[in-house]
Image: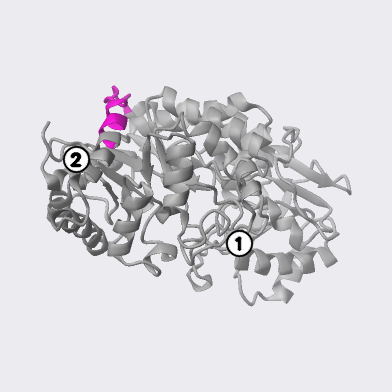
Amino acid sequence: MKLSLEEKIGQMFMVGFSGKEPTPELEEFLERIKPGFIVLFRRNFSSPEQILALTEWLHSLGPLSPIIFTDQEGGLVCQLGEMASTYTSPMGLSATGEEALSKEAGQGIAEDLLILGFDGVLAPVLDVNWEARNPVIGARSFSDRAETVEKFAGELLKGVLEKGIVPVAKHFPGHGGTTSDSHLSLPVVEKEEGFLRKVDLRPFFSLAPVSPFLMTAHVLYPSLEPEYPATLSAKIIGKILRREVSYSGVVITDCLEMKAIRENFSPEEIIELGLSAGVDVFLSSHSPDYQMSLYEELLNAVKNGRVPEARIDLSLSRILKAKAKFSKKKRPPLSQLRAQRERELEICRRSIVLVRDRLGLLPLQGDELGIVEWEKLPSTFAIEDARREAYLEPVAKEYFPKAETLLLPLENPDFETIRKFALSHRNLLLAPYSRTPEAERLQGQVISEILKIREDAVVVPLANPYDLRWFPRASTYLLTFSFRECSLRALFEVLRGLVFPSGTLPVKIPLED
């Protein structure tokens, strides 16, 4: 098929949009850009039937059907929520100690994506989370050890590929050492090149040949490239990935609307530097105006002779070659969605880690349970945008009929109310949810105070295993690596003594105890 210049340029974009239904405005926008790739998020979903109708409509647009992705890493990052298989987070998978279970999770996630009309998934995460203060990766990583990430991510990658879903390994050359979030600012990792090659880069060196797509990191690594973040670096993408690793697959940027890029580089600079670096696909997932500005910048750069069409053809050849490997698969019926729930639960059972139980509290006795939760603050959100949402009580009541929940604000909680609640329940469970450093600090301070009056409180973080740094003297500490239903059921089975927590901690938690 002979493509016009506009169609070639369109293949080099992945776009997202708001809304759950097709609109004339959306159709006009997509007809204009003709993107090679589309990414869908939670904002686009309401039911399995609606999702399937949307993906089928998107596939019907034009002769060059886009590859449709979503972000379904498992555990913490599941844009489809409970409508599709969630399993536990990558760190929970490695906590099982069984690499085959990681492959099984990859297969299960891919099966459900296929049923819903998706072609690809933005996973697996190859980042080695060696920085405990990392605000954006954490349990999304398999481990703080490169060899563990390599093994477990490699198995998940195999599972996804076996089901015919397109994987995107991320975030090259590694986001695991950051202490800031690229959604909000440009992170800088001050580590020597030798360390980065031995740790951060190892999973990518090993698995890049297996993954047809790689996503970049909006992170500055001065020892590798002192001037530009990896996404725009010819030294990191062009020299290390393209030449050293001989990677011939498709390089996709992380979302260019993250502040790390958008607030530091103009559309003209992004296009110029990205092309020079070796980027094939420019991802912009929110704003139609910004997406159009990037598209027009690239189109005009070719028309004006600033970028040779041969450079576009180079990326196009990689894109079309990768697309050709993933012919349309027969879609199973919606009735088969989440058919692996029992296996999903079993994997979550094996992921639960008992870090300590100094007072021998487990299993808990009686039907009474006081649960303390906090407002939920997803990564990239400001404190004032926290959601008043509790996760545990609906599942808890199946195991502890007299379970009650105290939902606290992140800022300025009423300590008298907390004290009364803590002292009025035989069993007390503290369940922080930390996806940002500020939320981690605020919840940690409250937990430290609660532990002064209830040494026997059980602490179970729902996201970040490193929370223990804020209250190192907690006597009983369990890890779920996830707040999804399968992980919560596994947790309460452990608390009731129905299941023994057999997981092993896949990271080191630095303590000052």
Q: Quadrant of residue 489?
A: top right
**One can see residue 81 in this view:** no
Magenta stretch, main secondary structure class: loop
Q: Where does the magenta region start and end?
A: 319-333
Up-down relation of residue 408 to residue 197 (above or below): below
Frontmost residue, 401 versus 209: 209
Report the colour scheme. one colour
Q: Is residue 414 magenta?
A: no
Residue drawn at x 47%, y 63% as measured from the top left: 227
Frontmost residue, 480 versus 157: 157
Residue 372 image position (x, y, % from top left): 67, 60
Question: Does dot 1 land on a helix, a strand or a loop?
Answer: loop
Which of the labelled discs sits on residue 57, or is there none?
2
Residue drawn at x 45%, y 26% as measured from the top left: 339
Q: Quadrant of residue 19?
A: bottom left
Which three-letter amino acid code belongs to the residue tagged 2? Trp
Q: Quadrant of residue 70?
A: top left
In this picture, residue 222 sits left or right of residue 446: left
Which of the labelled discs sits on residue 179, or is there none?
1
Give how far apart the Cα atoms at labels 1 and 2 are: 40 Å
| Label 1 vs 2, first from the N-terminus | 2
Up-down relation of residue 483 to residue 108 (above or below): below
Question: Mark 2 packing: few (<14 Cα in 10 Å), some, or many (20+)?
Answer: few
Query: Looking at the image, do the residues carrying marks 1 and 2 touch, with CB atoms under 8 Å apart?
Result: no
Residue drawn at x 33%, y 60% as measured from the top left: 270
Q: Nearer the viewer, mark 1 or mark 2?
A: 1
Residue 92 image position (x, y, % from top left): 63, 39
